[in-house]
Image (spheres, rainbow, N blue to C red):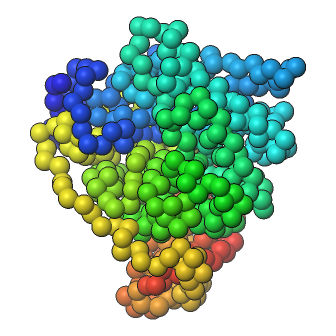
């Protein structure tokens, strides 16, 4: 295989694409590295090639994107027979295989006939079996020995090996009613895993990527897992991986939250169950791209060598819309729409290449202890008392600024976010993080929005790991 060169020359980003072969040199990371590419596949098919070529040249192996049940089976079964439509996903799998990339599908989004109700796309209890049948059909088409590969003999098969069941099921955005979500989801996962394993016993069936605790929209991820296993004790020893979305203000905070979840998984699911980081990243509405570049490089070189049991690393996202300056969701992309890299994207793929031995750069070696030091058990972590947090906020003299005065014990770390809901999604408009060396901090948050009623969300984590969350409704000038 030719080596890959991704260089920064004369201040300009230069991408040199190699001639990849199907007999790529083996490395120790298997299908570990990838990226989210939902927006790529929302573009015309003719625009996919430069993006997929760059992913492949960058040493990535997996591409995560939606596998929507509502798209595959828009109409209910008739006479007990399911009718599946694969026209949306056949071109995706074909394009990925042509570039040496493997699909990492996230199965979610019930059709209206199977959903709980208007605005809630989680599957009704009566239709859990229909979702499991869809999951098995997906595996039968795109998994090992699937009908898609049989009907495309010119392709070198890259069958799906990982099936992520739902997305952020502990969030009301993706699973509206959280009152019984852990129990209903546990039943969905168990049924889906059994159905997929019936088609492909070697498949990995992954618990959908859990968002981190963020009331009132997101339930605590540890409590969610605890309730899942309390409802279905038979899941212990019958989980192939747990997805996690550890969005945090800093890399250090990201590691800390992964360690916390690692401890919970060991206790609930059993030691050795891997974590798939199926989303992680930063938006340039709150973090400069240069800082994001350093953070993504650190994740790529540290997590695979850590003692946290990370099997997959899939940052969010390869590209995003970049159309609305007030919408943070539009600015997570690490690559440009024309197929050229941003510094953050370049840093990520350079780190991946170094770790996989695909470049001349030396990769760091040795095990990094991130999770063994998280000595407290999940039960203690979930019940640990948070620090005292006093919070005052007022609109600043300048437009669209908020002045915050916070008091917290020394050693406390504080994360502040200005948040609003738009189109059913939670949007972070401004973000700040601070560490308390003394008890008082003055923090200014700025947003591009004009006067608007929004929420200030504050999360304080004490030296002992306890959390205190406070939410205020504020109005900016």
Q: Is residue 303 left or right of residue 378?
A: left
Residue pictured at 17% horizontal, 49% vertical = 363
Q: Is residue 355 left or right of residue 93?
A: left
Residue pictured at 36% horizontal, 21% vertical = 99
In the rendered image, the vertical position of residue 141 relative to residue 283, given as above or below: above
Quarter of image, res 98: top left
Residue 18 position within the rendered picture, expressed as x and y whole percent measured from the top left:
21, 24
- On-image quarter of the N terminus: top left
Residue 423 position within the rendered picture, expressed as x and y whole percent measured from the top left:
70, 47
* Count of numbered tags: 0
Residue 424 position within the rendered picture, expressed as x and y whole percent measured from the top left:
71, 49
In the rendered image, the vertical position of residue 155 relative to residue 131, given as above or below: above
Residue 118 appearing in the image: no
Quarter of image, res 69: top right
Q: Pick the residue in front: 163 or 100.
A: 163
Residue pictured at 71% horizontal, 20% vertical = 84
Residue pictured at 37% horizontal, 88% vertical = 437
């Amino acid at each position: 295989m030719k080596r890959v060169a991704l260089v920064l020359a004369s201040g300009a980003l230069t991408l040199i694409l190699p001639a990849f072969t199907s007999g790529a040199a083996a490395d120790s990371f298997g299908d570990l590295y990838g990226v989210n590419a939902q927006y790529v596949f929302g573009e015309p098919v003719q625009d996919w090639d430069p993006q997929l070529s760059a992913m492949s040249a960058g040493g990535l192996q997996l591409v995560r994107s939606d596998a929507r049940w509502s798209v595959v089976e828009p109409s209910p079964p008739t006479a007990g027979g399911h009718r599946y439509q694969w026209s949306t996903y056949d071109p995706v799998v074909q394009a990925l295989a042509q570039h040496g990339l493997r699909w990492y599908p996230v199965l979610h989004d019930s059709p209206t006939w199977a959903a709980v109700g208007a605005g809630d796309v989680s599957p009704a209890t009566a239709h859990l079996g229909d979702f499991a049948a869809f999951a098995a059909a997906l595996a039968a088409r795109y998994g090992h020995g699937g009908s898609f590969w049989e009907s495309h003999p010119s392709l070198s098969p890259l069958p799906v090996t990982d099936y992520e069941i739902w997305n952020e099921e502990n969030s009301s955005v993706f699973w509206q009613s959280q009152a019984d979500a852990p129990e209903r989801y546990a039943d969905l996962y168990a049924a889906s895993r059994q159905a997929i394993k019936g088609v492909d016993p070697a498949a990995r069936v992954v618990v959908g990527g859990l968002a981190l605790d963020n009331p009132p929209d997101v339930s605590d991820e540890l409590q969610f897992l605890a309730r899942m296993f309390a409802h279905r004790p038979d899941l212990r020893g019958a989980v192939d991986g747990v997805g996690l979305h550890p969005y945090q203000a800093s890399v250090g905070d990201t590691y800390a939250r992964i360690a916390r979840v690692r401890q919970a998984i060991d206790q609930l699911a059993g030691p050795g169950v891997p974590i798939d980081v199926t989303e992680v990243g930063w938006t340039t509405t709150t973090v400069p791209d240069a800082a994001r570049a350093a953070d993504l490089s650190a994740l790529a070189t540290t997590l695979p060598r850590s003692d946290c049991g990370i099997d997959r690393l899939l940052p969010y996202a390869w590209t995003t819309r970049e159309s609305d300056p007030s919408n943070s969701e539009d600015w997570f992309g690490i690559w440009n729409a024309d197929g050229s890299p941003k510094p953050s994207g370049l840093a990520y793929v350079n780190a991946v290449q170094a770790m996989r031995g695909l470049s001349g750069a030396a990769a760091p070696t040795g095990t990094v202890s991130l999770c063994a030091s998280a000595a407290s058990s999940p039960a203690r972590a979930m019940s640990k008392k948070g620090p005292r947090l006093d919070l005052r906020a007022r609109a600043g003299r300048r437009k669209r600024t908020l002045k915050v005065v916070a008091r917290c014990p020394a050693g406390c770390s504080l994360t502040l976010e200005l948040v609003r809901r738009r189109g059913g999604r939670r949007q972070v408009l401004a973000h700040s993080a601070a560490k308390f060396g003394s008890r008082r901090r003055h923090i200014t948050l700025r947003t591009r929005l004009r006067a608007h009623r929004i929420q200030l969300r504050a999360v304080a984590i004490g030296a002992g790991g306890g959390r205190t969350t406070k939410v205020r409704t504020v109005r900016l000038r």
